Amino acid sequence: MSKPTIGFLGLGLMGSAMCQRLLDLSYPLTIIANRSRENVEKAVARGAVEVKTAREVAERSDIIMLCMDTSASVESRMYGDDGVIAGLSPKDIVIDFGTSLPSSTRAIGEAVAAKGGFYLDAPLGRTPAHAFDGALNIMCSGDKAAYDSVETVLKDLGENVFHLGALGSGHTIKLINNFFAMTTANAMAEAFAMADKAGVAREQVYAVMSAGPNHSGMMDFVKAYAVDGNPHALEFAIKNANKDVGYYGQMASDANVDSIMSKSVREALSGAVEAGFGEKMVSEMVDFLTQKYSENGSS
C-alpha cells in the first residue's frame, strides 16, 4: 500500500528529527520554511518538497503535522487565508505534536471539524535523539476513528503510543507531566547549587540521593551537567520549560484552581529567562541558581 502524504510544520530540534525519520521510511513529505534553514535544507536534500504557505502544505497532504513552540505559533499556522485550515480537504487529519494549551487545542479542533477534518493532539515525550530512531512517547487524543487511521504512522515515530481520550486530553496530561518533571529538575538543580553554597561536593550529594527512592531519570539528566558537564542529556531549553509550566498554571486557573507547587518552579525558570539563560538547557538551571545564591551571599 502507498504511504499517506505528510505535511510538516515546525522543523526545530524535535520536528527536524521527526522529518528525518519520516524520510528514512519513505513517506512523501511537504514542509514549510522554518527559522532554521539548515534543517529545511537537510529535509529538501533528502526529497522533501518545500512550499511557501501552511495552506499549500495542507493542500498537498493527507496528514498535517505540527511541532511548534507555543499555542500562539500553532494558531498562527492554523488560521487565516494562508493557514492550514484554509487548505484542508474533508477527512484530512491534523496532528499537533507540540505542548499546547488544552483550551486552544479544543477551539482549533472545532474549526478543523467545520471543514470536515479531524484534529488530534499528540504531545511528545523523550528527546530528538529518540525521534531519529522512531522511539518517542506519543500521548495522542481526539476522535478514535481518526486515531486508528493514523496509528501506523504514529508507531513509525514512537515506541510507546497512547490514545488518551477526548481532544485535549493529551495536552492536559503532557502539561501535568512537564510540571512534575520541571519541578523535579529544578529541585535537583537547587540541591547541587546548595551543595556548592554549603561546601559539600556535588558528587557526594548525587551518590547519596541516587542510592535511595529519590533516584530518577530527571535527577540523572541534571547530574549529567552539574557533575559531568554535559548539558545535552536532556535537550530541553529553559525558555520552553518556562512556557510549559506557565501553561500548566493557566490550565489550573481555567479549572478554578490556584496551583501552589508550580509557582516556585515558574519563579525560578522565569528568573533564569530574564537573566539570559533562556536558550540554555534545563540542566543548566544549576548555573543560574549558583550565580543567584552567590550574588545573595555577597550582598
Image (cartoon, grey):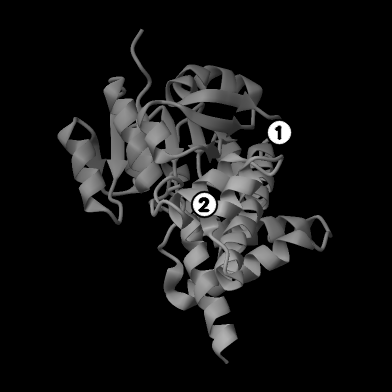
Q: Residues within 10 Å of mark 1 (few under 14, many from 20)?
A: some
Picture disc at residue 166: 1
Q: Tell me the quarter of the picture where residue 140 sits.
A: top right
Which residue is rendered at x = 56% and y = 24% of the image? 161
In the image, 165: left or right of 135? right
Q: Tell me the quarter of the picture where residue 7 sits.
A: top left
Where residue 62 appears, as percent x and y from the top left, is 41, 27
Where residue 12 appears, as percent x and y from the top left, is 36, 48
Instruction: In the rendered view, tell whether residue 285 sits above or below residue 220.
Output: below
Near-viewer residue (134 or 207):
207
Q: Are marks 2 and 1 in contact (CB under 8 Å)?
A: no
Which residue is rendered at x = 46% and y = 47% of the image? 234
Q: Earlier in the sequence, mark 2 or mark 1?
A: 1
Near-viewer residue (2 or 268):
268
Picture disc at residue 222: 2
Where residue 129 appears, as percent x and y from the top left, is 38, 36
> Farthest residue toward the bottom?
299
Q: Secondary structure at mark 2?
A: helix
In the image, 129: left or right of 155? left
In the image, 258: left or right of 34? right
Which residue is rendered at x = 60% and y = 36% of the image? 113
Q: Tell me the quarter of the picture where residue 254 sits.
A: bottom right
Instruction: In the rendered view, tell whether residue 14 sits above or below residue 199.
Output: above
Looking at the picture, which amino acid does disc 1 mark?
Ala
Where residue 222 appears, as percent x and y from the top left, is 52, 52
> What is the spatial separation of the Cα atoms under label 2 and label 1, in whole angstroms?
34 Å
